[in-house]
Amino acid sequence: DLGPDDLSTFNQLGISLRKQGRWLDAVKEYKRAFSLAPNSDVLHYNIAMAYAEGGDFKTANHMMLKAFSLNAALPNSSATIAYNMAQVFIKGYAQAKAVRCLEIALELRPDFAEARELLAQANEMNNAEPQQA
Protein backbone atom coordinates (compact mmCIF):
# COMPACT_ATOMS: atom_id res chain seq x y z
CA ASP A 1 0.00 0.00 0.00
CA LEU A 2 1.38 3.32 -1.07
CA GLY A 3 0.56 6.58 0.63
CA PRO A 4 1.47 10.26 0.43
CA ASP A 5 4.63 9.63 2.46
CA ASP A 6 5.94 7.51 -0.43
CA LEU A 7 5.94 10.53 -2.75
CA SER A 8 9.37 11.57 -1.49
CA THR A 9 10.74 8.11 -2.35
CA PHE A 10 9.41 8.28 -5.92
CA ASN A 11 10.75 11.81 -6.24
CA GLN A 12 14.25 10.83 -5.08
CA LEU A 13 14.24 7.77 -7.34
CA GLY A 14 13.28 9.93 -10.31
CA ILE A 15 16.01 12.44 -9.56
CA SER A 16 18.54 9.63 -9.22
CA LEU A 17 17.48 8.14 -12.56
CA ARG A 18 17.73 11.55 -14.21
CA LYS A 19 21.28 11.98 -12.88
CA GLN A 20 22.12 8.64 -14.53
CA GLY A 21 20.75 9.91 -17.84
CA ARG A 22 17.76 7.58 -17.59
CA TRP A 23 15.14 10.28 -18.10
CA LEU A 24 12.52 7.91 -19.53
CA ASP A 25 12.76 5.65 -16.48
CA ALA A 26 12.45 8.76 -14.32
CA VAL A 27 9.26 9.73 -16.17
CA LYS A 28 7.82 6.26 -15.47
CA GLU A 29 8.52 6.62 -11.75
CA TYR A 30 7.09 10.13 -11.63
CA LYS A 31 3.95 8.91 -13.40
CA ARG A 32 3.56 6.19 -10.77
CA ALA A 33 3.72 8.91 -8.14
CA PHE A 34 0.86 10.82 -9.78
CA SER A 35 -1.53 8.30 -8.23
CA LEU A 36 -0.33 9.51 -4.82
CA ALA A 37 -0.24 13.24 -5.50
CA PRO A 38 -1.82 14.24 -8.82
CA ASN A 39 -1.62 17.93 -7.87
CA SER A 40 1.96 18.08 -6.64
CA ASP A 41 3.76 21.08 -8.10
CA VAL A 42 7.12 19.49 -7.27
CA LEU A 43 6.20 16.29 -9.07
CA HIS A 44 5.10 18.21 -12.17
CA TYR A 45 8.32 20.26 -12.03
CA ASN A 46 10.48 17.13 -11.83
CA ILE A 47 8.68 15.32 -14.64
CA ALA A 48 9.03 18.48 -16.75
CA MET A 49 12.77 18.43 -16.09
CA ALA A 50 12.96 14.75 -17.09
CA TYR A 51 11.16 15.42 -20.38
CA ALA A 52 13.43 18.41 -21.04
CA GLU A 53 16.49 16.23 -20.46
CA GLY A 54 15.05 13.82 -23.01
CA GLY A 55 14.55 16.64 -25.53
CA ASP A 56 10.73 16.54 -25.43
CA PHE A 57 10.26 20.25 -24.83
CA LYS A 58 6.60 20.30 -25.82
CA THR A 59 5.69 17.89 -23.01
CA ALA A 60 8.22 19.50 -20.67
CA ASN A 61 6.61 22.88 -21.22
CA HIS A 62 3.12 21.45 -20.64
CA MET A 63 4.21 19.86 -17.36
CA MET A 64 6.08 22.98 -16.24
CA LEU A 65 3.05 25.14 -16.96
CA LYS A 66 1.01 22.74 -14.82
CA ALA A 67 3.56 23.01 -11.99
CA PHE A 68 3.38 26.79 -12.27
CA SER A 69 -0.43 26.77 -12.27
CA LEU A 70 -0.43 24.61 -9.13
CA ASN A 71 2.03 26.90 -7.37
CA ALA A 72 2.84 30.29 -8.91
CA ALA A 73 5.38 30.84 -6.12
CA LEU A 74 7.42 27.77 -7.12
CA PRO A 75 10.13 29.86 -8.86
CA ASN A 76 10.60 31.78 -5.61
CA SER A 77 11.71 28.63 -3.78
CA SER A 78 15.24 28.79 -5.22
CA ALA A 79 17.25 30.52 -7.91
CA THR A 80 18.07 27.15 -9.48
CA ILE A 81 14.42 26.12 -9.70
CA ALA A 82 13.53 29.49 -11.25
CA TYR A 83 16.38 29.12 -13.76
CA ASN A 84 15.40 25.56 -14.66
CA MET A 85 11.79 26.61 -15.15
CA ALA A 86 12.96 29.42 -17.43
CA GLN A 87 15.03 27.03 -19.53
CA VAL A 88 11.97 24.87 -20.15
CA PHE A 89 9.70 27.85 -20.78
CA ILE A 90 12.09 29.33 -23.34
CA LYS A 91 12.23 26.12 -25.33
CA GLY A 92 8.48 25.71 -24.94
CA TYR A 93 7.82 29.22 -26.22
CA ALA A 94 6.44 30.62 -22.95
CA GLN A 95 8.77 33.61 -23.17
CA ALA A 96 7.00 35.89 -20.69
CA LYS A 97 7.07 33.20 -18.00
CA ALA A 98 10.73 32.50 -18.80
CA VAL A 99 11.62 36.16 -18.36
CA ARG A 100 9.74 36.37 -15.07
CA CYS A 101 11.45 33.22 -13.74
CA LEU A 102 14.86 34.60 -14.70
CA GLU A 103 14.09 37.89 -13.00
CA ILE A 104 13.19 35.93 -9.85
CA ALA A 105 16.39 33.88 -10.12
CA LEU A 106 18.40 37.11 -10.26
CA GLU A 107 16.48 38.63 -7.35
CA LEU A 108 17.32 35.55 -5.29
CA ARG A 109 20.91 35.35 -6.50
CA PRO A 110 22.18 38.52 -8.20
CA ASP A 111 25.50 36.86 -9.12
CA PHE A 112 23.79 34.08 -11.15
CA ALA A 113 25.69 34.60 -14.42
CA GLU A 114 23.87 31.85 -16.37
CA ALA A 115 20.49 33.38 -15.47
CA ARG A 116 21.69 36.82 -16.55
CA GLU A 117 22.89 35.41 -19.91
CA LEU A 118 19.64 33.51 -20.49
CA LEU A 119 17.63 36.62 -19.63
CA ALA A 120 19.57 38.58 -22.25
CA GLN A 121 18.84 35.84 -24.81
CA ALA A 122 15.15 35.81 -23.88
CA ASN A 123 14.95 39.58 -24.24
CA GLU A 124 16.67 39.37 -27.64
CA MET A 125 14.15 36.72 -28.72
CA ASN A 126 11.28 38.93 -27.57
CA ASN A 127 12.68 41.93 -29.45
CA ALA A 128 13.23 39.85 -32.61
CA GLU A 129 9.60 38.66 -32.76
CA PRO A 130 7.51 40.51 -35.35
CA GLN A 131 5.14 43.05 -33.83
CA GLN A 132 1.39 42.52 -34.30
CA ALA A 133 -0.45 45.30 -36.11
Image: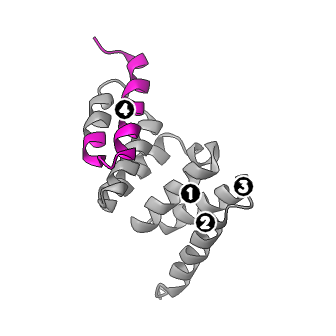
Are the two marked residues, 2 and 3, in contact with CB atoms closer than 8 angstroms? no
Q: What secondary structure is found at the residue carrying circle 1?
A: helix
On residue 109, the disc is: 3
Check disc 2 and give the amino acid type: Glu
Q: Position of residue 58 (x, y in %)?
A: 31, 60
Are the two marked residues, 1 and 2, in contact with CB atoms closer than 8 angstroms? yes
Could you tell me if residue 31 is visible in this image?
yes
3 or 4: tag closer to the N-terminus: 4
In the image, the segment drawn in magenta is 1-27
Q: Is 25 colored magenta in this rendering?
A: yes
On residue 102, the disc is: none
Q: Which residue is mark 4?
A: 13
4 or 2: tag closer to the N-terminus: 4
Q: Position of residue 10 (x, y in %)?
A: 36, 28
Q: Which residue is mark 1?
A: 83
Q: Nearer the viewer, mark 3 or mark 4?
A: 4
59 or 70: nearer the viewer: 59
Q: Marks 3/4: CA distance? A: 28 Å
Check disc 3 and give the amino acid type: Arg
Are the two marked residues, 4 and 2, in contact with CB atoms closer than 8 angstroms? no
Q: Marks 1/2: CA distance? A: 8 Å
* Residue occupying the point 64% across, 46% down: 76
Q: Quadrant of the N terminus?
A: top left
* Residue occupying the point 58% across, 51% down: 80
Above or below, 22 relative to 112: above
* Residue occupying the point 31% across, 15% down: 2
Q: Marks 1/3: CA distance? A: 11 Å
1 or 2: tag closer to the N-terminus: 1
Give the quadrant of residue 73: top right
Q: Which residue is mark 2?
A: 114
Q: Nearer the viewer, mark 1 or mark 2?
A: 2
Q: Position of residue 118 (x, y in %)?
A: 57, 70
